[in-house]
Amino acid sequence: MNLSGEWRRLCELDWQELDLKESGSWPWSLQLLCCLLVMGLTFVGGYWYLAEPKASELALAERKERDLMRDYRSMVVQAAGLQGVRGQVVELDARMKALHEMLPNGAEIPALLDHISETAIEHQLEIDFIRLRRPVEQAFYIEQPFDIQVRGDYHRIAYFLAGVASLSRIVTLHDFTLVPVDGQEQLRLSMLAKTYRYRLPGSEKGEA
């Protein structure tokens, strides 16, 4: 095989006079180059029309697989803690129910005031008044304030406050004023007390 001769023939070849009908008489090196070119174009065309769409589908499937695997791991972690969350929900429901039972409804407010009066009498206090104020509506509950004024000695007033705080219904105490009663060995306690009624979300104003 005379490579230098073939190279010289290629260099001396008049490319404008080449005719495909006479390709059999072309130098073998030119025929080889044409075959390689045709094979390369065939390979590129085949890849473009056949392999490229499949490669895109494969890449998309791999992305979906990674996303699904990430979601699966997240769900596994959530499932592992689901039992604990259920236990917490049951506990919270029980605590919420107990708190609801401690909130008097509208019909129980007078009975609550009677209990406070009985607590004052039990500790030998004189009741000046126990007077309801207008209720204050909040988003999830209705606040029912009332004024209390009683008289007695320091220790009996302290026992009275402890008794009110230990009632089965929720009562909060605010704005204490404790002053001596003129000409007597007594103290006068004035304070604002509040109890609360549960209000269902979305209920109309005034409903308890």
Image (cartoon, rainbow, N blue to C red):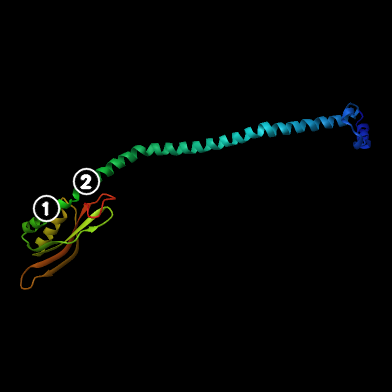
Residue at 6% across, 58% down? 121
SS state under label 2: helix
Q: Callout 2: few (<14), some (14-19), or many (20+) C-alpha neighbours within 10 Å?
A: few
Assess whether mark 1 and mark 2 are in contact (beta carbons under 8 angstroms).
no
> Where is 30 relative to 151, above or below?
above
The quarter in which the N terminus is drawn is top right
Q: Position of residue 165 (x, y in %)?
A: 16, 55
| Quadrant in which residue 12 is drawn | top right
The amino acid type, in three-letter code, at marker 2 is Ala
| Quadrant in which residue 126 is drawn | bottom left
| Residue 98 badge | 2
The amino acid type, in three-letter code, at marker 1 is Ala
Residue 127 is left or right of residue 75, and the answer is left
Residue at 92% across, 29% down? 2
Residue 35 is left or right of residue 7, and the answer is left
How many tags in the picture?
Answer: 2
Residue 59 is left or right of residue 81, and the answer is right
Residue 104 is left or right of residue 85, and the answer is left
The answer to whether one can see residue 167 in this image is: no
- Look at discs 2 and 1 and give the one toward the viewer: 1
Task: Return the residue nearer the eye: 121 or 162.
Answer: 121
> Where is 106 relative to 60, above or below?
below
Q: Position of residue 23 (x, y in %)?
A: 88, 28
Q: Position of residue 59 (x, y in %)?
A: 59, 36
Q: Callout 1: few (<14), some (14-19), or many (20+) C-alpha neighbours within 10 Å?
A: few
Q: Report which residue position mark 1 lands on.
A: 111
Residue at 87% across, 32% down? 30
Mark positioned earlier in the residue sequence (2 or 1): 2
Q: Position of residue 143 (x, y in %)?
A: 22, 57
Q: CA distance from mark 2 to mark 1?
A: 19 Å
| Residue 137 badge | none
Task: Return the residue nearer the eye: 56 or 82.
Answer: 56
